[in-house]
Image (cartoon, coloured by chain):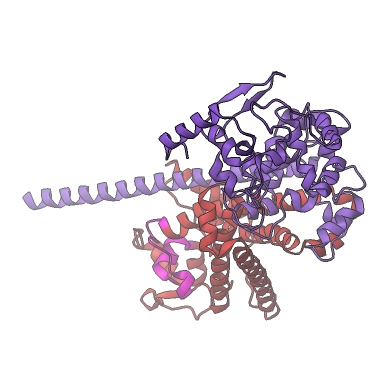
Amino acid sequence: MGRRYPLLSYLILLVAFFFPNRLLFADNLSCLICHESLKGTYVTAKGVESRLHVNGEKFAASVHGDLECTNCHLGYEDNPHSSVEENVDPELLGIAKAIAKKSPVDPVAQAACAQCHPDVYEDVKQSVHGANIFDKKEVDGALCLDCHGSPHEIMHVAGAGHDASASPVAYGRVVETCGQCHEKKSVSLKYGFSTKIIERYNESFHGKKYHLGGSNLPVCTTCHGAHNIRAQNDPEAMVYGVNKIELCGQCHAGANAKFVAAITHKPIGKDNPIPYYAEKGLILLTFLVISGCAIHIVLDIFALVRQTAQVRKRRRNEVARNESSVAG
Amino acid sequence: MKSHAMSLPSQVDALPREVQRFDMHFRIQHIIMLTTFLLLFFTGWALKFSEVETSQAWIRFWGGPKTAGIIHRVAGIVMLLDGVYHVAYLVYRFAKGKLRFDLVPVWKDVVDFYQNVLYFLGASEEKPKFRKFNYLQKFDYWAVFWGVFVIGTSGLALAFPTKAALLFPAWTTNWIWELIYIMHSDEALLAIVFILFWHFYNEHLRPEVFPMSWVWITGKMSVSDLREHHPAEFERLFPEAAEKGAAGDESAGSM
C-alpha cells in the first residue's frame, strides 16, 4: 500500500496523526497504515526488542486474515498503545504472565491464541514443550509461533506436498522446523536427547525417502505428535513402550517389540560396537579391494604399454634390417 | 563350467576356430544378473545419497521414491532367484558328472598372481599360464557370490522388516538393524565400485577386448584368444597342437 500509493498513504497518515479517532483505529487498515511502512525494531519499556513491520498482504492471505489486530493485541485499542493488560481477561493474563519470560515481546498477544484454540492450549500446556515453560519456567520449548512462524503470516497446514513456501509445520517443512531446536547441540545436551536426531532421521529409510520427495513417509510429528508431544520417557508418549508398537503398526502391520527397536535416532557410536566396527571393517574392506584393483590395473596398463613399445621396436628393427640388406 | 570335450584334433590345422566357454544357462544367468544389478544400482544409489540434490530428479526419473522402491525390491528378488538358479544348475551338472571345478581357487592362482606381478614389473618375460579361468576372473566370480549373500540377506530383512523381526533373537535388537543397514548400504557401494573398476576394465577396456568381450553373448572364445590368455586350458584341450606350437613359432596369437 505504502509503496503503491505514497501520496495517499502520506495523507492518511497525516489525517490519522492529527485526528485520532477510536473508530478509525479499530480497523486493521489504521494499524497497517503505520505498521506496513515501519521497518526495524524498537525497544519496549521492559527492554525487549520488538519488530515493527507487518506485511498486510501476507496477513490478509493468512488463516487469520479476517481477524482484527486487536483480537490478539488486546489492550491496544487506543493510540498510542498505552493500556496494555487493562481490559484483558484475567485468565488470559495469567497465561501471559506464565509465558512472559519465553515470549516477552507481547505475551498477551501470544496468550491470545488460547482464546480460540483452547484444546490446543491444553495439549501444549501438558506437552514436554509446554511443561518446560509453564512448570519449569524455562525459556526453551516451543510455543505457537516457534513452529507456526510469524504470527501475522500463519498458513494452513493442509496439503502434504514439499512446497518450500508452505507453513513451517506443513509436511514438507516440519523436519526442518523441528531441527531449528533439535539440531542445536546445547539444547540436546541440556535435555539429554541425542545430538544427532535430525541427522539420524535423514539417514534412515524414512528420512531418505522423505527428502527424495516421498509423501507417505513419517515425519517428526507423525510419530511424536504435535501439540501433545511428550518426552520419550513419559508413559503418555506415542513412542513410549507398547505405544510405539501400536504406532509403528499403523504402517507396518505385524510390528512387534523387536521390530520397533529399529528406530532410535541414536548415532552409531562405540557404545554399540557391532555396527560401529562392522562399518569400519566394511570401509576398510572397500578401501583395500578398490586400491588393490586400482594398483593391479595400473600395473597391467604399464605392462601393456611396455609390451606394445617392445613389439614396435622389434618391428622397426626388422624393417631397418630388411632395408640395410636390400641396400647391401 | 565344463568346456565341451571334443575329440582331439590330430593336426594343428584341424583346430576349431572357437571353443564353448559358457553354455546357454550361464549366459542367461549373466544377463539376469547384469540387468538386475544395474536396476538395483540405479535405484539404490539415489537412496544412499539422498542428501545430494540431483538424487531427487534422478528418483523422479524412476517414478518417484515409491516406484523406485518397488523396482529395487523386485530386481533384488529376481537377482536372488538368479542366484538360486545358478546354484541349482551347478548341482544339476554335478549330479550329471559334468561339473568341472574350474572356478575353485587353487594354489596355482597365488603362483599365477606372483608371476603376473613379476611380469608387470618387467622382472620376468614370462606371463603366467592361466587355466580356463585366471585369478582375476575367479575373484570377479566369488565377489558376486559374497555380494549377493551379504546384500541379498540384508536386503530381504530390510524389504520384509516385520517378518525379519520374528526371526531375530531379542538380545540382538540393539544392533541388528544398524548392522543390516550398514551391510546393505556399504557392501552395495563396494560391489558397484568394484564392478565399475574391475569388471569394466577387464572385460571392456583392455585392448584385446575393447569395446567389449563378446563371450557373454556368444558363449564362445576364439582358439587364438584361448591360446594367448588361457594357455593351460588350451594345452588341456589340444595337447598335440600345444606341443607343436611350443616347438614352432612363439609369437602365435600375440597382439
Identify whether B153 is placed above or below A207: below
Would residue B215 be counted in the magenta stretch? yes
Q: Which x, y percent locates residue A42?
A: 61, 22
Q: Which chain is red?
A: B
With B227 as the anchor, is A249 left or right in this view? Answer: right
With A42 as the anchor, is A185 left or right in this view? Answer: right
Instruction: Return the residue nearer the eye: A325 or A146.
Output: A146
Q: Report the number of numbered marks.
A: 0
Would residue B223 be counted in the magenta stretch? yes
Instruction: Return the residue nearer the eye: A106 or B144.
Output: A106
Residue at the image position 65 percent from the left and 45 percent from the top: A154
Q: Given the current orientation, which residue lies at the most extreme left position? A: A327
Determine which quarter of the picture holds residue A257. Answer: bottom right
Residue at the image position 55 percent from the left and 65 percent from the top: B63
The N terminus of chain B, quarter of image: bottom right
Q: Which x, y percent locates residue B193?
A: 54, 51
Instruction: Return the residue nearer the eye: B147 or A66.
Output: A66
Q: Which x, y percent locates residue B2?
A: 58, 73
Q: Which residues are magenta?
A: B205-231
- Residue A60 visible in the snapshot: yes
- Residue A192 visible in the snapshot: no
Identify whether A41 is placed above or below B243: above
Q: Which x, y percent locates residue A139?
A: 78, 28
- Chain A, chosen colour in render: purple
With A273 as the anchor, is B54 left or right in this view? Answer: left
